[in-house]
Amino acid sequence: MTLNNDPLWYKNAIFYELHIRSFCDSNGDGKGDLLGIVSKLDYIKELGVDCLWLLPMMPSPLLDDGYDVADYYNIHPDYGTIEDFKLLVDEAHQRGLRVITDLVLNHTSDQHPWFVESRKSKDNPYRDYYVWSDTDEKYKGVRIIFTDTEPSNWTYDETTEQFYWHRFYASQPDLNYDNPVVADKMIEVVRYWLDMGIDGFRADAVPYLFEREGTSCENLPETHTYLQRVRAAMEAYPGTIMLGEANMWPDELRPYFRGDPNDPSVPGDEFHMAFHFPVMPRIFKGLRLGEATDIINIMRDTPDIPYNCQWCVFLRNHDELTLEMVTEEDRQLMWNEYAPDPTMRLNLGIRRRLAPLLDNDRRKVALANAILFSLPGAPIIYYGDEIGMGDNISLFDRNGVRTPMQWTDDETAGFSDTTPDKFWASLIADETYGYQRINVATQQNQDDSLLALMKHFVAVRKANPVLGWGTCEFIDLDNTAILAYHRAHEAEQLLIVCNLSDTPQMVTLPLADVVGQTPTDVLTEESLGVVDAVEYGMTLEPYQYHWLRFE
Ligand code: NOJ
């Protein structure tokens, strides 16, 4: 098998995000690596996903788990070699799986040779690779992202008695994109990895590339112009994509696609894909309150995008569940509901995994995924969530949601040949989420496991391309515990109906267009009663959902 050559493959793709350090250790050093991933490609293939997203893999002091790059042209020695990487890409491609990697454009590690030079003296040739200032008064009011640890976006550097600019940890100085040499060098990095045969990038922290006085220093026109340059460079590599990480409101995200949704002759020419951040916390809020309104409102606020662009939707990832895109009131509500213990909170978010967030309640986990897989956009599965792994909030920073993958119930959880005391992070071993109970091997043998259900979602989603391509109309209902939306593409249609609440709900759906037809749930192949009037009544059990086809 090889890759299909559909240039729009990402429209209906499913992504699998994985943390190399935690997935599988091939050489017994207690840290996952690239060859470990190679050994698990058949598992990933069987899950049915289309594309892997690898978290940062370049040499790094790992003060931000690799988002602090010290060398853009190599692989972190813990993870393997460039040869291993080429093998991984090749083996993935042979199985029809694509591979995208993280691309950190905004900043480097302070141990990157450019910064080591830059901080030496004011006339060092690398000085202008970064953003220096005599005062920390410039760009006043620009928000701090890592609010728990960083008192300022400026850090004083004694050697030259100036401050340098950083939007994340002080160990991650921002590159200076006003310096054309820097701008060019990062395009070279892009080409280097694309030449290696990868299928694109998850572009990290893209809103922050440029700084301008009197602005928020976010989403600036200069930043868009540069990203269009990156995109233009990618055009030489057909079928590659840029998935942008911009944690912004929908109307701020829209310009990252450009193009004209109403005119196919004006396709998008910046990002191919962007994460839809704001819908994610609203799914959790909706499930907690049994209330669909916020999900509907944010999706209605989401602008149309050109035909060659796509959203990426997700429930959890390697970071805290971010609450940046909610009101202050909702943030408090989400913290109270989902992070009652303050150590579960981090910056403006919640550092917990999907299963524990949803009380390990199979009905809620299933419903959250039923929504994820049927909303507009390509869904992402975060490694371990397909088996319902737990978290360990006693670990530093976001490591609690990045623990070793649980493959088997033996002492090492099948993660490594070495003993667990040598693992880079301890295994989850508690009674509920421990590897002894929650692991791939056990679930592979159970027809009713979460893993089996996730495979089913993936397969049914793939069998219904309307979910990747279709329009989405939300239906206004008197019963706001019910979330209902209609997906349509050419002759294909699906009606999604979900009960977000923990009690049975009756709902009357306006189905004038399908009177005389019989709805069948494509997930269960079960038929519901024929639609005999324009108003169709049904009752849904707590957290029940249907994906309905009419015939
Ligand atoms: C976003 C990444 O997802 C996060 O893990 C990282 O800390 C920041 N960008 C900084 O690179």
Image (cartoon, rainbow, N blue to C red):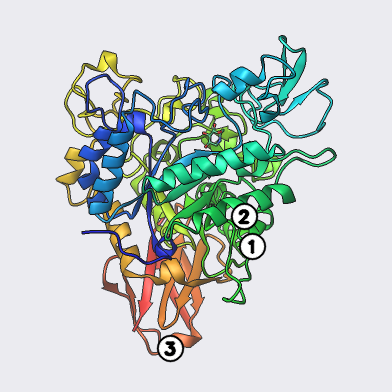
The kind of residue on which mark 3 rests is: Val
The kind of residue on which mark 2 rests is: Gln
User: At which x and y percent is residue 153?
Assistant: 71, 26
User: At which x and y percent is residue 451?
Assistant: 26, 47
For label 2, the SS is helix
Identified at 35% across, 40% down, the residue is 383
Identified at 38% across, 70% down, the residue is 465
Give the quadrant of ligand 1.
Answer: top right
Q: Give the CA distance from mark 3 to mark 2.
A: 48 Å
- The residue where tag 1 is placed is 258
Task: Establish whether ligand 1 lies closer than 8 Å to the Cβ of label 3.
Answer: no
Q: Give the CA distance from mark 1 to mark 3.
A: 40 Å
Considering the image in quadrants, where does the C terminus appear?
bottom left
- The residue where tag 3 is placed is 515
Identified at 25% across, 17% down, the residue is 420
Identify the image quadrant of residue 250: bottom right
Report the front residue among 462 and 474: 462
Q: Is residue 4 above or below residue 104?
A: below
Report the front residue among 521 and 202: 202
| Horizontal arrangement in the rendering, residue 121 relative to residue 362 (left or right) | right
Considering the image in quadrants, where does the N terminus appear?
bottom left
Q: Is residue 344 above or below residue 263?
A: above
Q: Earlier in the sequence, mark 3 or mark 2?
A: 2
Residue farthest to the bottom, as pictured: 516
Task: Establish whether ligand 1 lies closer than 8 Å to the Cβ of label 1.
Answer: no
User: At which x and y percent is residue 239?
Assistant: 42, 60
Disc 1 + disc 2, Cβ < 8 Å = yes
Report the front residue among 7 and 536: 7
The kind of residue on which mark 1 rests is: Arg
